[in-house]
Amino acid sequence: MKRLPLVFLLAAPLFMHAGQPTLTIDATQPAGAVSPRLYGLMTEEINFSYDGGLYGELIRNRAFLDQADSPQQWAPIQENGASVSLALDKAQPLNEQIPVSLRIDVKQVASGKRAGFANGGYWGIPVKPNTPYRASFFAKSAADFSGEVTLSIEREDGHITFATGKVSGLTNTWKRYEVLLTTADVAPTSKARFALTFNQPGTAWFSFVSLFPPTWNDRPNGLRKDLMQLLVDLKPKFLRFPGGNYLEGNTIAERFQWKKTLGPISQRPGHPCPWGYRSSDGMGLLEFLQWSEDMGAEPVLAVYAGYSLGGESVKAGPDLAPFVQDALEEIEYVTGDATTTKWGAQRAKDGHPAPFPLHYVEIGNEDNFDKGNTYDARFTQLFDAIKSKYPALKCISTVAARDPEIQRVHSRQPDVIDEHFYDTVEAFYQKATTQYENYDRKGPEIFVGEWAAYETPFKPWDKRSAGEPPTPNLRAALGDAAFMTDMERNSDVVVMQCYAPLFVNVNPGGRQWRPNLIGYDALNSFVSPSYHAIKIFSTHVGDQILKVTPADTPLFVSATRVSATGEIYLKLVNPKPSAEPITINLKGSPQVAATATVVAMSAASTEATNASGTPTAVGPQTTTITGVSSGFVFSVPGNGIVVLVLKPE
Ligand code: AHR
């Protein structure tokens, strides 16, 4: 899509546009303090966000637990007349947690040829040039096998090998083998698979077959680098995890059980996630915490509160007590001293002696769906236990202020209320001037823990949205940006907010929801206009709210100032296709520099968007303008999201 010419962005002397709509920024004194944690991230296992997404593991169904009766995602390699059978074998489990293995019987293989099995990863194995991949597996063999196992990253038809290595000496007991496979100067492709092949007949058992590319900060159980870079670039101040519905599970048994996600990954069985596939739990509690730390963000920990998505709930009182204890122990794992607390010591043993910072704990997720209206009692029990052990922690209620009275918490005053908004662009424009303007400042703080504007006729969970692009276009981004001006103007009460969902694997079958912020396949990633809108906002935010009074303008606005430097960030969102010239008056500000920086994203059509093949069609441009003063005219581009950076002279 064509971007608007930059001439629209030029500031002009005031007299040229007398009678313009005006914006008056009151810089005499701040109208409030911007929350230091306003911009953050929310994630969960949805749309193959972790497995097949951020989590570096390239092998799908590495523990052979995805399907009870067959080794899903694994296929035999039987070239040149070879004969191979693959079967799940419960009689040869790897350990108590992984109660199954893959049995391979190579019945026939010609001399100098190969036979074996392969995995196609999450819609392909990403092959990049000159790249080391860490392949590993557990294996043991029957007495009839004494040959070599060749590990290969190869083209999906097996005819081209991109990287290869060998293992020999399998014995009759389980042992872990690891090989580094390094590609040469090959062309990038995801039309590849990971193969394990034998050079002679025999029987062997495999478990936990794994392949990792280089990861962020080189962590062995680490995260995909391109996606991490995109997140770090947003400068998030917090990470809300582990969900979302993913925290609750469809049933109590399928909730996120943090204790089962600790320790060696080869002892994590994974669990069914509520989005229709099995989670490997490679992203366990410690990985979430380290992920936050790696982004310079603080964890916002959601603890299971006795309600699951399918409708099961735990009665408050003795029935809930073990869950309350579990939540307390989870908090101790995050924050406890490594030498004096049991779970702090466990965290140290797992590799992170230093406690993590924690200020907010969310009690459950969307408990307004609990038809039994039991949240008040469950919240109270958890709240009291948390406050008594950790008085400084703020507890978040998941029932919104607008939810029916009967669902809300009455017995205690929640510190924070988590509100979720998935709504049309038009509804977001409405919210942009009304949602939090008149919110009772004596009430609980607000956490907008999930929000996204959608621009198609379908609600995000509507199966018909499967035909729409997985990420939103500029029209949705305009709605998102407009709503962000409201949250920012009111960030004395809106202490945190985060878009959801964050990720989508764009392959067919990879998605359960739209819109999503960041799209990817095995090899490449791209960001939506909404991502850019968030980045423009989150990387230009001061610590003081300045009151802006708009007059006769369709623009949505917000202004903040950095108290240390006096720099003012004026955010302007123009939902109209035509440019909007406005007079900007700065009241009470010291002299402003004549030159200002403009970061702007706009396009002639709101249909403009980014996609796999066209990842950079829409994005911000940074320019400078001159002629800035305490009263100047600025033309906001049509369909535009703009930050004006005004510097003191
Ligand atoms: O973001 C997708 C889902 O929307 C979340 O899991 C849930 O909390 C909400 O309903």
Image (cartoon, rainbow, N blue to C red):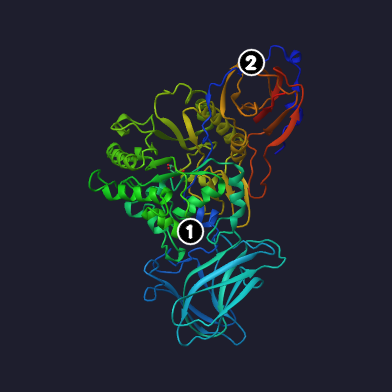
At label 1, the amino acid type is Gly
Question: Residue 592: image x %, image y %?
Answer: 71, 21
Question: Residue 473: image x %, image y %?
Answer: 60, 39
Q: Which of the two discs, 1 and 2, labels the residue nearer the N terminus?
A: 1
- Mark 1 Cβ and ligand 1 under 8 Å apart: no
Residue 634 left/right relative to 193: right
The local secondary structure at tag 2 comes to strand
Q: Quadrant of the N terminus?
A: top right
Q: Is residue 222 above or below residue 106?
A: above
State the residue lying farthest toward the left.
318
Disc tally is 2
Res 259 → quadrant: bottom left
Q: Is residue 383 above or below residue 583?
A: below
| Picture quarter with ligand 1 | top left
Residue occupying image coordinates x 40% and y 39%: 393
Residue 464 left/right relative to 593: left
Q: What is the number of the mark on residue 587?
A: 2
User: Mark 1 and mark 2: span between their CA atoms?
Assistant: 53 Å
Residues 289 and 338: in front is 338
At label 2, the amino acid type is Lys
Residue occupying image coordinates x 55% and y 33%: 480
Residues 541 and 558: in front is 541
Q: Nearer the viewer, mark 1 or mark 2?
A: 1
The local secondary structure at tag 1 comes to loop
